[in-house]
Image (cartoon, coloured by chain):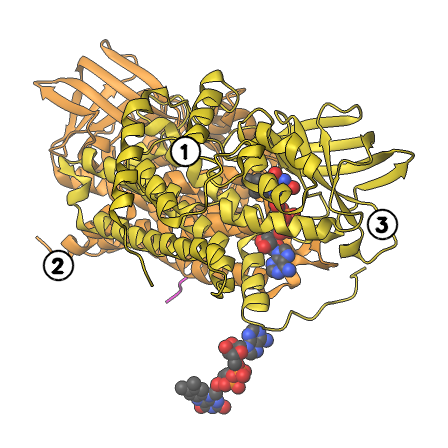
Chain colours: A orange, B yellow
Amino acid sequence: MEFGLSQEQILLQDSVNKFLGDQVPLAKVRQIATGEDNDSAVWKGLAELGIPSLLIPEAQGGVDLGTVDAVIVAECLGYHVTPSAFISSAVMAPVALMAAGKDDTLAAIADGNHRVGIAFGEAIGARRDAGILVDGTTLSGKCLFVLDANADAYLIATPEKSLYRVRADAKGLERNILTTIDKTRPNCELILDKVEGELISDDPEVYLQTLDAGRIILAADTLGAAQSMLDQAVAYAKQREQFNRVIASFQAVKHMCAEMAANLEPCRSMVWFAGHAFDELPDKKRLIACHTKAHLSEVGKFIAKTATEVHGGMGFTDLVGLHYWFKRIGANRQLLGTPELVRDEAARIQGFAA
Amino acid sequence: MDLSFGSEYEVFREEVRDFIHQHKDKQPNPAEMRSEKTLAWQKLLIDHGYHSRTIPKKYGGYGAEPDIIKSRIIAEEFSAEQINTGLSGQGISMLTPVLLEMGNEEQKQQFIKPTIHGELLWCQGYSEPGAGSDLASLTTKAELDGDEWVINGQKIWTSTAHIADWIFCLVRTEPDAPKHQGISFLLFRMDTPGIEIRPLIDMTGKRNFNEVFFTDVRVPKDQIVGKRGQGWLVANAILGHERGSLAPPDVADARLNGVVDLMRTETIGGEKLMDNPVYRDRLMQLQGRAMALRLNDMRLLSARINKNQDVKLAAMIVKLMGTELRHEIEGLAIDVMGEIGLSYEDNPYVRDKGSWQFQYMFYLGLIIGGGTSQIQKNIISERGLDMPKEPKVAKSS
Ligand SMILES: Cc1cc2nc3c(=O)[nH]c(=O)nc-3n(C[C@H](O)[C@H](O)[C@H](O)COP(=O)(O)OP(=O)(O)OC[C@H]3O[C@@H](n4cnc5c(N)ncnc54)[C@H](O)[C@@H]3O)c2cc1C
Ligand SMILES: Cc1cc2nc3c(=O)[nH]c(=O)nc-3n(C[C@H](O)[C@H](O)[C@H](O)COP(=O)(O)OP(=O)(O)OC[C@H]3O[C@@H](n4cnc5c(N)ncnc54)[C@H](O)[C@@H]3O)c2cc1C
């Protein structure tokens, strides 16, 4: 048994971290978040590293790696609060399309030239403003909080858990950016008026599989973002002085940091294991995905708050940009099912409730 | 213990309700601090005794005798309908009580009336880049030159400095005295030459606080509250008020009522949020905590009138518990909204103008501002429970 990363995985992690550290520093993230720039150059750079092709088979130009590898990349992206279409285009869309046996666009996705967004809100828990109606092969209605405002196509899940694909430039489709707290990854709404859609799968398993993958990736993103906040808090505490001493020498501050570390460290094992289970443990993977998503949401929330507190007033300002991580973690919590909802699913999966 | 509400109070409650129904259309947008509507609403509240209730008439208040039950009734009726309770800036909640306690007669005459009526906006110039939790190490200095103080230095995190008319400011006037005894409390206009204000963006995206730089700012000598070197005493009197005012229990109640409204109207997958037992339990837990804090507040109020009770600890916990509670109430609203809870700013699906998201972050700011939670816990343990301080260390080099 070896519960750890392989040499290749460590190399992958290093190369992604190096690229993000050099090419997508906080200054760049800020430009994208404030609308001065968009994420296409970042996506192109990630494509050069092969990131969008990670899960795609070699036959379609991919590198055919596993979900643990995807989790590692997501952790790096969260650590650097990187704006990217990774969760939708590199993970959820390929998982759905491969499970449904629809290979036609995988090569373009692998190149990074074709971005696929995800519109699952209606199937997860429809809210009062939205709703999707299918009539033959046309879709009408509204999807909210769709992942990736800059995609070329979207996978839409209906309340019956069927998946349809629509093109972003399809007739009758209107796309509006929705401002959210997390400006690093813009969401949008899709308003559909008899839009021609292609049925990808009417097997709920395909939808569920895709959802599980998305939840694991959100958890991994939170893991990385929370690790960064902890690292920043520790570094700040060692350098900031009050009462003639560094604040890291106050037990209150040390305990805040120790508690963050104590909560976060088991999360790393959990997230890695969730990636492993997704590929290897079909009977357990859904339960593990649910718990990982919910648990990371809770730990992330605690760390987002506590790391900000360690920074004092500085944490509340834009000066050090800590809020980008705070909001990213907040968004990951709300997307694809909030903790209560996901834990309820975990109980049902185990037959604890009907 | 006598908590009976006599019939006189039921009459009073009816009066408050009548007022609300008659005037609630005149409520201003709480974000506007300067509009005519805001000033008119503020005056209306003071004239009816629903704001500045116990501030003497000669200083522009309503001049009522303290009466906890009436204050309670006003608070209950206003929060039940989520009615705007009037202005609460730093001038009103912090400076006014201090002037009443420590100001001279001229200062009371000059400042209190326009301050409570919202005509004079104040900012609080305490924190500096090197003096946050260790406020007493502040270095902004004021030297007497003839009839004027000459001020040099820098403040930071100064909320509303960019819109304030005046500042109450801590400065070092006695450089040779021990650090707590060398500070004075000055009041001066924000348009005095030599003041430069640089706004800082905060995590909510707003520019509500600032860096403030002083270069040879000249201020009349008599604009000091208390004596030279007594500024720390004056400031601590204010900090007591600030800590009480940062998270008023009645506003927590009003926000909880807002969550109730959300949970009754919003649905997920067709199910009303209030029908979800997990969310409902989280709501009830917070309601219980809010209730305990509100009753704690009532006991504090009562002790202000009957001074025979020891409420030291009850007062010390207010800021810590109140700000944490508010942060959690706002967070529950976001959680129950699911993906809609992400909405912000101009998002058309945002509920209640994004106030839940804004306040969730803002209350994290208030967990830090006005003395962090860690500092509150030090105060509770050291001054409240008589535990020894952490050993002091020599200046680390
Ligand atoms: C069920 C049980 C089984 C045990 N079994 C064994 C055993 O088999 N063999 C053995 O040798 N011992 C054993 N112990 C003893 C145990 O290791 C000690 O109780 C423990 O180390 C704490 O020491 P103490 O009781 O002297 O408490 P103290 O050290 O006096 O601590 C009292 C409180 O002060 C706090 N405190 C102390 N120092 C610090 C500090 N620097 N910073 C912050 N807080 C501090 C502690 O956290 C604690 O809350 C056992 C204890 C228990 C309760
Ligand atoms: C929203 C907001 C509004 C504000 N408005 C104003 C204003 O209008 N006017 C004004 O003057 N100031 C204002 N402030 C500043 C505020 O008072 C300070 O931020 C606060 O006192 C903390 O100081 P600091 O930011 O320097 O943090 P630091 O003092 O550097 O604290 C950093 C961390 O160290 C911890 N720490 C420090 N000392 C100790 C200790 N002895 N024991 C244990 N832990 C310790 C703190 O708890 C914190 O976690 C505001 C701040 C905020 C966030």
Q: Residues within 10 Å of mark 2 (few under 14, many from 20)?
A: few
Q: Secondary structure at mark 3?
A: loop
Is residue B16 shown above or below A256?
A: above
Relative to B196, A211 lies left or right: left
Is residue A227 shown above or below B55?
A: below
Identify the residue at horizontal 58%, vertical 47% (top origin): B370
Amino acid carrying label 2: it is: Phe
Residue B206 rendering spot, x and y as whole percentages: 53, 28
Q: Secondary structure at mark 2?
A: loop
Q: Are marks 2 and 1 in contact (CB under 8 Å)?
A: no
What residue span does the magenta drawing correspond to?
A1-5
Q: Which disc is residue B174 wearing?
A: 3
Q: Residues within 10 Å of mark 3 (few under 14, many from 20)?
A: some
Identify the residue at horizontal 60%, vertical 44% (top origin): A313
Residue A227 rendering spot, x and y as whole percentages: 50, 51
Q: Which residue is mark 2?
A: A352
Identify the residue at horizontal 14%, vertical 53% (top origin): A348
Chain of the residue that carries numbered disc 2 in the rendered image: A
Q: Secondary structure at mark 1?
A: loop
Q: Which residue is mark 1?
A: B85
